[in-house]
Image: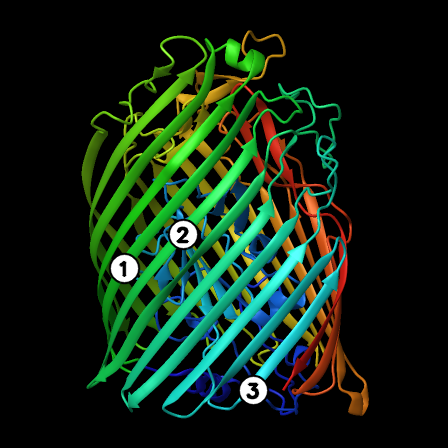
Amino acid sequence: MLGTDGVAAALAARLVGPAKLVAWLATIGSAVVCDDPASAQPLPDAGSVDELVVTARRLPELPEDVPIAITAVSGEALERLQATDMASLGKVAPSLVMVRTGAFTQPYLRGVGKRSTLGVENAVATYVDGVYLASSISALLDLRGIERVEIIDGPQGTLFGRNSIGGVIQVLTRDPQREESAEAELHVGSYGYVRGDGYLTGGSDRLAANLAVSLSRNGGYDANLFSGKSDQGEVGHSLVARSKVVWRPAEPVRVTLAADYQDIDQDFSQRPVSGFLPIGGPSVLDFRIGDQDASNRYRFRYGGASVRADAGIGDLTFMSLTAVRGMHAHYATDLDQGPRPLLSAEAVARQDQLSQELQLQSSASAPVRWVAGLYYIHIEEQYAPTRFDFGREYSAQRGGLVRQTLSDTGRVSSYAGYGQATVPIGERTRLTGGLRYTVENRSVRAQGERLFDNPPFVRPIPGLPLPEQEPFRSSRTFREVSWRLSLDRDLSDRVMGWLSASRGFQSGGWNLQSPQSPSFAPEGLVAYEAGLKYLDRSGRIRADASAFYYDYSDLQVSAFTPLGSVTTNAASAGIYGVDAQVTAQLAASTDVAFGAQLLEARFDSFPNATCTDYSPDAATPYAPVVCDVSGNRLPFAPRLKVNVAANHSISIGRNGAVLLSGALAFNSGYFSEADNVVRQAAFATLDLSAEWRPAPRGPSVRLWALNVTNSRYYDSLVTFPTTGVLQRPAAPRRLGVSIGYVF
């Protein structure tokens, strides 16, 4: 297998251009230019070459050699503009939209995604150092102390352990170095934002380790009139810790132990959407100011550990990856959005997973390059419990219902074998084929009760037994084949083109918020794509473009009902579009990047969708109804996304350099539900920073401004039946300074 040094050397051998080139680190598909050397040190010597390496095909490659649509962004580039969590990635990748529904973080790639919850996994899989994160709560990942993020479009089941129908977000953390070094950084900003980061690494050729720790807090952005506190969006604390130990007992063997932990305490207050009056009757209807009596506090704790062993067996490379992860969440929501106790919810969620992957890979220099693997994952998740509290007239309208409590557990055991091989056809053409077979068993167990203020005081939830009775049980097994076929060709020394077709699937199961509802069926997606990648002779300009069509069948769509979130299957949807990205070095000290996507994503057939009656004179406000949404746009699928970024380094002689950076992100807006009534309007954000770093080691100072235009947009948008339309406002304009030191 080629290492990073070997790949960079291969790039250097291929580039033909002026001897006085100043290298820049960027990747095709990145909406910001990544790892400009001037951001970390004074301007490099002329003639230096440095290149971001990606592992989208499970081996290190140069971006322009990968016949897949991919966005890669370095950790340093994300840190430069304070894009330090998963929600920020939508600002740097044109194909990605990141949203939250309460506790759950949900990525959408090219319009493919879903409202995940326990029992319903994200359509876009998230991996950290090769370990799949089953929990969409855990997908609220902090990105401090990482090496890079790769965002890969389209089904990826023939390469990654867990089948992914929409794509992959792959987070790679920093490897330890044998040279001892340390980093410390303090960040202070608007609204009481304070964050401290620390990083240590060191060791020897045989054993090296690192530790990254971050602790932060943030004050609220606006007030809750009922409590008198300015705690909207407050983060009481966020603790993040990551560590790696790399042991090389012998030359062909490498063992990596990794662990991570995250603890977040935050306010997740939601506000009414203009034009949709909530039932709670708040005294003010404002984008950010609220008037709520019930708690909106969220507390998440999650983490895990893994052991990875890599060994050379002749010309082959063997890899074993064993991982365990856990998640515990306790969160509460005021659903009526007012000062009266009408409807609130509280949940305790837990999830544990164990995964094992075995992989065998050919040599990077082999005529036929291939990878084959076996994958197993076991997931156990539960609501322990979920509780709804009803009061006053809202309770009276439901026959005196006071409280509903649901406790349920879901289990998943999935086995898969996968493989992919690339065969050369002549000197310039390569044919790639991949296959995956998955067997997945899902089961559910559930009980629940309702408490009333009139006899009988204890009654079962419709469709479920009482807690003291034998629980409801059900299980299903799914078997499915996924595949990939692609043809790529070097059209010239500078241009590579490819054609591909692939199929992904995601198993069916039960939404654990409504386990008594019928199980939803598996969904499948067949993706067709054609693309071009270009690298000019000097290495100053990179560009890629792709056109795609997705035939999406039986797609899993979740909507809220009085039972909770319910997942059903739409018959079919069609998605097509074009995305393009260009990065260019305009001068030795100036880089620019551009990314855009045009997307058309509509339901072809969905006659039995769960919609909402928004009529102001409806007998029951916001009552769920069944309607035909065929022809409507898919939720969270903007027609246009654009990302523009620029870096300019100013040399100040012996005092190093100042790097000026800016990133503009535009989103044309999207609907939040299948009925296409509630809509996020078009919005744009602008982030700026200026960093001074006199030397690779020593002090640094960075000034930053986020959402400079103070755009108003939502990071969560959902219609909740019988109560209203809820939105969580994204953060306003923020200013700050970061002071660091590298020892």
User: Residue 631 placed where, x, y %?
Assistant: 47, 27
The three-letter amino acid code for the residue at tag 3 is Ser
- Of the numbered discs 1 and 3, the one sitting upstream in the chain is 3
Q: Which mark is residue 300?
A: none
Residue 87: horizontal and vertical position, in percent?
Answer: 56, 52
Along the line of sight, the residue nearer the viewer: 235 or 552? 235
Q: Is residue 661 left or right of residue 445?
A: right
User: What residue is rendered at 65% in x and 57% in y?
Assistant: 217
Q: Which residue is mark 3?
A: 181
Q: Earlier in the sequence, mark 2 or mark 3?
A: 3
Q: Amino acid at mark 2?
A: Met
Q: Quadrant of residue 384?
A: top left
Q: Is residue 471 above or below residue 258?
A: above
101 lies above or below 432: above
For the residues marked 1 and 2, what is the alpha-carbon distance in whole angstroms?
15 Å
Q: Is residue 678 visible?
A: no
Looking at the image, do the residues carrying marks 1 and 3 touch, with CB atoms under 8 Å apart?
Answer: no
Circle 1 packing at 10 Å, graded few (<14), some (14-19), many (20+), is: many
Seen from the viewer's position, the closer of residues 417 and 321 is 321
In-image side of 219 versus 385 (left or right): right
Q: CA separation, marks 2 and 3? A: 32 Å
Residue under pointer 1: 355
Question: How packed is label 2: few (under 14 Cα within 10 Å), some, or many (20 or more)?
Answer: many
Figure quadrant of the N terminus: bottom left
If you read the primary sequence from the N terminus, does the residue marked by circle 1 or circle 2 appear first? 2
Write down the quadrant of residue 695 in the picture: bottom right
Disc 3 is placed on an element classified as strand
Residue 269 in sight: yes
- Label 1 sits on what residue type? Ser
Residue at which label 2 appears:
327
Q: Residue furthest right?
A: 652
Disc 1 vs disc 2: which is toward the camera? 2
